[in-house]
Image (cartoon, helix red, strand yellow):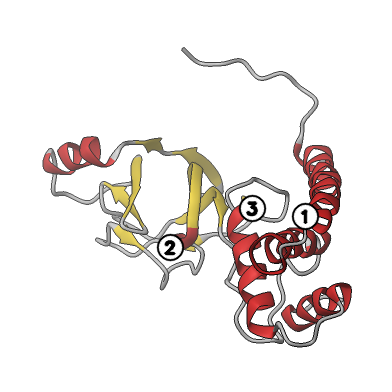
Amino acid sequence: MGTYLDLQTAIATDLTRSDLGDQIKSAILDAVEHYETDRFYFNVTRSLTFSTVVGQAAYGASDLAQIPYIIGLDALFLIDSGRPYALDKYEADEFEWLQSTSTGNGRPCAYTYIDSQILLWPAPVAVYTIRPHMHYKLTELSADSDTNAWTTDAEQLIRCHAKLLLYSNLLEDTEGMQRMSVQIQSHKDRLDYKTAARMATGRIRGTCF
């Protein structure tokens, strides 16, 4: 178990149906879309980085493939001489004003995220390493051989939710829907627990007002 095809085959076997190939694919993608805005240990990261280019303020897919698929950008760090510096986050309209205040290059101290790009201010005067802390969409499943955390770590959740959609929208099986609803909650709770266990610090953080 682990590929997009494995997941399709498992669902078809569960339903004892061999004539729902396209519908099963669609249900899987809809299930993924339903959960991709939830934060799990496999769709948040601080381990990816990209390098700045002198004079370049905007950064997108060519700089880091995940940038256009960011759901939430929690923080952005600039590494200079081995030391991380947290950049200030601005809303797009505030950043527009900020950009108008200076045209010179420097060490970036502020950023915004808009049009599927990260914008830095001021434009870099040197090559720096940028590390985003982000929640992002995993690469979409397309080819049967494709695999990602939705077909491995979260396979049971996606499998059950896809079957729920099929029972509801295609097969009109109320009993099947009820069974899946119970199983979905169980699998979701398990993933939430794993996420909390891996990511929680055990410390209470103060809130800034």
Q: Name the foreground residue: 88 vs 191.
A: 191
Left/right of residue 55 with respect to residue 135 in the rendered view: left
Callout 2: few (<14), some (14-19), or many (20+) C-alpha neighbours within 10 Å?
some
Quadrant showing the N terminus: bottom right
Residue at 52% x, 50% y is 132
Q: Amino acid at mark 3?
A: Tyr
- Picture coordinates of residue 203, whole percent (x, y): 76, 22
Q: Secondary structure at mark 3?
A: helix
Q: Can the viewer see residue 117 in this picture?
A: yes
The residue mark sitting in front, 1 or 2, is 1
**What residue is shown with label 3?**
35
Q: Secondary structure at mark 1?
A: helix
Callout 1: few (<14), some (14-19), or many (20+) C-alpha neighbours within 10 Å?
few
Left/right of residue 158 with respect to residue 122 in the rendered view: right
Left/right of residue 72 with respect to residue 112 in the rendered view: right
Residue 174, which numbered label? 1
